[in-house]
Every structure is written in C-alpha cells, then in structure tokens.
Image (cartoon, rainbow, N blue to C red):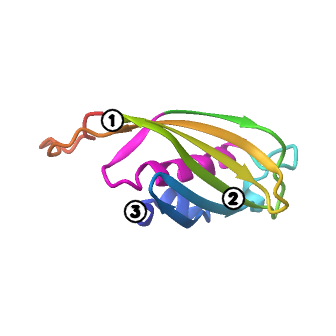
C-alpha cells in the first residue's frame, strides 16, 4: 500500500515497519511544512499520524480506509525535527477498528496523540464505472 501512496512519500514520509496491526513511520519537518508561528503546521503532523494509522490497519491484508480520526497536539515540532509516528491497534470488530498513534520528536517528547477509526472495504469487484468500492 505504501508504494502506491505518492502523497505520503512525496512529503518525505518513510515506512519503518508495519505488521500485525502496528506500524511506524517517520518524517523530517522541512521549511515548506512550517506555519506563521515558526512551528510545523498541524496538517503535516496529522498526515504523518494518518499514514501510520493507514499502514497499521492495512497490515492485515484487506483494503481498509479511515472512517474518522482526531488528533490532539501536545507540543510543537520545529524545522528539522525528525518525527516518528507509532501506530497500535486497540481493537478490531467486524469490519471496523480503532487505532492509536503517538507522534514523537527525536528527543522522545510527544508532539501529538491521534485516534483513528477504520473500516474494511466490502470485498466485491469494482463497479464498471470505476467508482470507489462501497464502505
């Protein structure tokens, strides 16, 4: 899945590991990710957490998408910081799941806590008009 994700890879997100409902991804904060307060824009921190979440919930095999997600920003990230997002599965039930992601700086300080809700796609052939599968 990560190989087919130009959005995350294009922003420098690296896959460290992913297996059995867990994943680790990292990203260096670049000058184009800095906002008017001279800190990392929250959207980029969310993207990193969301990518780790996606890698974790797709590690089981079936195509799975986000049903929702929320983030709490704990402390800022700054230019040059290497951020690491560690995703952990909390539970899966039916086609749904809940995953927690912690984003940290190199010094171990927590930057953000993210919770994502997943939904596994219905396993059926894509419609003839190539719309996204039903969730």
Identify the residue at image location x=54%, y=37%. Answer: 116
Instruction: Name the residue that disc number 3 marks.
Output: 4
Identify the residue at image location x=48%, y=55%. Answer: 55
Q: Earlier in the sequence, mark 1 or mark 3?
A: 3
Q: Secondary structure at mark 1?
A: loop
Which quadrant is the C terminus positioned in? top left
The range drawn in magenta is: 42-67
Calculate the distance from the C-alpha at mark 2 to the C-alpha at mark 1: 28 Å
Q: Earlier in the sequence, mark 3 or mark 2?
A: 3
The label nearer to you, 1 versus 3, is 1
Seen in the image, is 38 located left or right of residue 122?
right
Seen in the image, is 61 located left or right of residue 107?
left
> Which dot marks residue 125?
none
Whole-percent x and y of residue 7? 51, 56
**Picture quarter containing residue 130?**
top left
Q: Secondary structure at mark 2?
A: strand
Calculate the distance from the C-alpha at mark 3 to the C-alpha at mark 2: 21 Å
Instruction: Name the residue that disc number 1 marks.
Output: 95
Q: Could you tell me if the residues under marks 3 and 2 are in contact, i.e. CB atoms within 8 Å? A: no
Q: Secondary structure at mark 3?
A: helix
The label nearer to you, 2 versus 1, is 1
**Picture quarter containing residue 129?**
top left
């Amino acid at each position: 899945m990560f190989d087919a994700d130009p959005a995350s890879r294009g922003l420098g997100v690296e896959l460290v590991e992913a297996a059995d409902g867990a994943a680790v991804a990292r990203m260096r904060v670049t000058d184009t990710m800095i906002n008017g307060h001279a800190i990392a824009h929250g959207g980029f921190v969310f993207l990193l957490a969301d990518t780790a979440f996606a890698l974790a919930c797709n590690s089981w095999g079936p195509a799975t998408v986000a049903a929702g997600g929320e983030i709490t920003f704990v402390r800022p990230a700054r230019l040059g910081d290497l951020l690491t997002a560690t995703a952990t599965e909390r539970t899966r039930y039916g086609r749904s799941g809940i995953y927690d992601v912690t984003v940290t700086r190199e010094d171990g300080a927590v930057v953000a806590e993210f919770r994502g809700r997943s939904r596994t796609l219905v396993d059926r052939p894509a419609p003839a008009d190539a719309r996204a599968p039903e969730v």
